[in-house]
Amino acid sequence: MQKGKKRLSSTKWVILITIWTFFLGTSMSFISETLLRNTDLTIAFLVLVFIIFVGIIFDLIGIAVASSREKPFHSMASNKLIGANYAVKLVRNAGPVSNFCNDVIGDICGIISGAAAAIIILQIRSLYQINLPSLSILLSGFVASLTVGGKAIGKEIALKKSKEIVLFVGVILHHLHKYLGFNLFHRKNSRKAR
């Protein structure tokens, strides 16, 4: 009975995250493509770097949540530290949270940064009337090295400072709920402490 409920919950999560990924991916792609096509080269390049940076930050958050333990946040929550209750919820839901941060946002940013690089290459070619194959190779190399290098640095930071990162995200979620009414966790999670 318990296994059946768990499997159903897991299936629901997979369906939900697939639908979310589709809509999130298409909307982020549309926004970034619109921004990139209607701006000058410098702004387009900054948008590209921003997209890569967002992917790195979410990857860092996903790793920090997955590598954290729940116990320290309980003592913080008992001392009424802002964000500690959300930190507990993040760690309790480490699987879905890290899946969303690392796989959904991280992969979407990776795909969009590749598309953004292609748009920038087209802009350079049309502005300067050049057709250099080395240009696309260089920009692809830049995107790949910035992404991989950034995620490697982020992973080191996430593993060393996981408690601080999770608490910081908890504070952000607290303020989002307080001022905007946004609540990431709708129901109480009765899972055992990690």
Image (cartoon, rainbow, N blue to C red):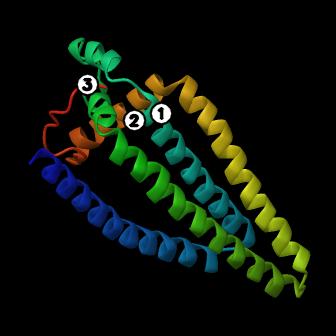
The answer to which of marks 1 and 3 sits earlier in the sequence is: 1
The answer to which of marks 2 and 3 sits earlier in the sequence is: 2
Report the mark closest to the observer, 1 or 3. 3
Callout 1–callout 2 Cβ contact below 8 Å:
yes
Q: CA distance from mark 1 to mark 3?
A: 16 Å
Residue sitting at x 60%, y 30%: 157
> Would you name the residue on which mark 1 appears?
64
Q: Which residue in the rendered view is the most extreme toward the left? A: 1
Q: Is residue 38 visible?
A: no
Q: Name the spot of residue 53 as percent of width and height, x first.
A: 60, 51
What's the amino acid at mark 2? Answer: Val
**Element class at badge 3:** loop
**Element class at badge 2:** helix
What's the amino acid at mark 1? Answer: Ala
What's the amino acid at mark 3? Answer: Ala
Label 3 neighbour load within 10 Å: few <14, some 14-19, many 20+:
few
**Element class at badge 1:** helix
The answer to which of marks 1 and 2 sits earlier in the sequence is: 1
8 or 183: nearer the viewer: 8
> Would you name the residue on which mark 2 appears?
169
Label 1 neighbour load within 10 Å: few <14, some 14-19, many 20+:
many
Residue sitting at x 31%, y 61%: 14
Residue sitting at x 50%, y 47%: 58
Label 2 neighbour load within 10 Å: few <14, some 14-19, many 20+:
some
> Would you name the residue on which mark 3 appears?
193
78 or 159: nearer the viewer: 159
Q: CA distance from mark 2 to mark 3?
A: 19 Å
Apparent side of residue 167 relative to residue 145 in the rendered image (left or right)? left
Apparent side of residue 179 relative to residue 128 in the rendered image (left or right)? left
Q: Name the spot of residue 134 as percent of width and height, x first.
A: 90, 74
Q: Is residue 59 visible?
A: yes
56 or 63: nearer the viewer: 63
